[in-house]
Image (spheres, helix red, strand yellow):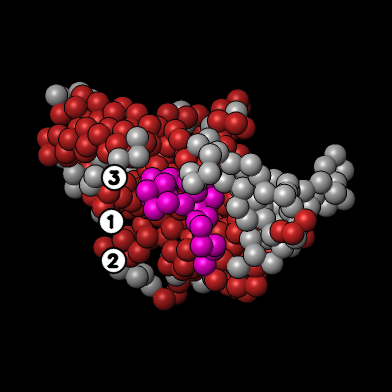
Amino acid sequence: MRELVARWPGWAGYAAAVWSLAYGALGLFWALGGGGFPFGRSDPDWEPGLSVLGEATRQAAAPVIAVLGALGVAAGWAMARGALRGRPLLLGFAWTAAVTLTVVVTDNRVLMLVAYAPLLAVFAFTGVPGGQPMAELVPWSRINLFVLLAGGLLWALAALAYQRRTAGRCPACGRGEHGAARWTGQHAVRRWGRWAVVVAAVVPALYDASRFAWAAGVPLGITEEFWRWLDESGLRWAGLFLSLMGLGGAVLTLGLVQRWGEVYPRWIWFRAGRPVPPMLAVVPASIVSVIVLSGGLTYWRLRMVHGFGDVDMWATWAPSLAWPLWGVALAAATLAYHLRRRGACRRCGRGGAWGTDGPGERGAGPAAERAPEPGPAAGRPAWRG
């Protein structure tokens, strides 16, 4: 599995093509009258502003999905093969697909399901309180959002690998013959990465503070009547659960600039003193940043449709409007952590010197003390082997 993950630049394009084939087939199925169309008013969660496809119909949207799926198969295959003809079109299609699927088409329901995942796991064994079936909590329309998110992430990987490969850079690490840009150096990364972490930790604290207050009996940012309703319905405890999840996320975010985010601390006795694998932080933080950004954009859509609400109820809507900033800041903080932790590339052998790309788990140290890794024949970049 580890070797398969390390070879992602080679299979990302094919994986994006396979995903496009499968989802395009779904579009064809819906176009031919098949059931389960998850968009528009067929969505059981439908409300104005929730989804950009809230008014989509099966008759109009399904054929478009089928055509885009077919185009995705062709584009993904061409990118995986390293085609140079039509490079701008291929990159434009790939990055558009990545952004659309991960941020535009998905909405805040992905974030909600991720946040409530521990409770849903318990409900799967104990049953939902009140006897509500699990199918109502996790209907196909919500599962479909995760399918779209997965497709968007695959397209992002495919686009990144293809862009690097066709630009003469290592597809795995992105380094070129002329070294890294100044903003990716250790000193620059530590500076802007620290600010990104501060923003990514402070923004959700605004949301968490109000929910902690509600759980403590203080109607911060809401009316007394609304707080009594939360108390009677038990929803104030659901808000407390989300706040605890947010607090845990903020602590983990701080780890992106703390030593315990690089080396396991003593209280993790079975791993104490060992390096934290960078991808253990980079992968989940990257995914969460995309989910938070998508959720934040959803709240803006809902507010544009329904209005910005009563000032006396500001805590129910105002903190969520800052979530796009949270998502961008978390993505930047994660990138800084990755740039700071990455060592010498196992594929091309570049980087890994102290003060440039930063020490890695292997091959770290002054460049003069490390012999270069052998590459293929002279005159041929190592990454093309």
Judge whether 343 appears above or below 182 on screen. above
Q: Are marks 1 and 2 in contact (CB under 8 Å)?
A: yes
Query: Which residue sits at x=54%, y=63%?
Result: 180
Drawn side of residue 22 relative to residue 57, left or right: right
Q: Amino acid at mark 3?
A: Leu
- Residue in the foreground of this view, choosing between 97 and 163: 163
Under circle 1, the secondary element is loop
Q: Residue 111: x, y in percent? A: 47, 49
The numbered mark, 1 or 3, whose residue comes first in the sequence reads 1
Q: Residue 351: x, y in percent? A: 62, 56
CA–CA distance in space, label 1 to label 2? 8 Å
Query: Which residue sits at x=38%, y=72%?
Result: 310
The numbered mark, 2 or 3, whose residue comes first in the sequence reads 3
Q: Residue 343: x, y in percent? A: 66, 52
Q: Residue 187: x, y in percent? A: 65, 72
Under circle 2, the secondary element is helix
Q: Amino acid at mark 2?
A: Met
Query: Which residue sits at x=87%, y=43%?
Result: 269
Q: Which residue is mark 2?
A: 304
Q: Which residue is mark 3?
A: 84
Drawn side of residue 95 relative to residue 319, left or right: left
Q: Which residue is mark 1?
A: 49
Magenta-colored span? 160-181
CA–CA distance in space, label 1 to label 3? 40 Å
Under circle 3, the secondary element is loop
The quarter of the rendered structure image containing the N terminus is top right
Quadrant in the rendering for residue 16: top left
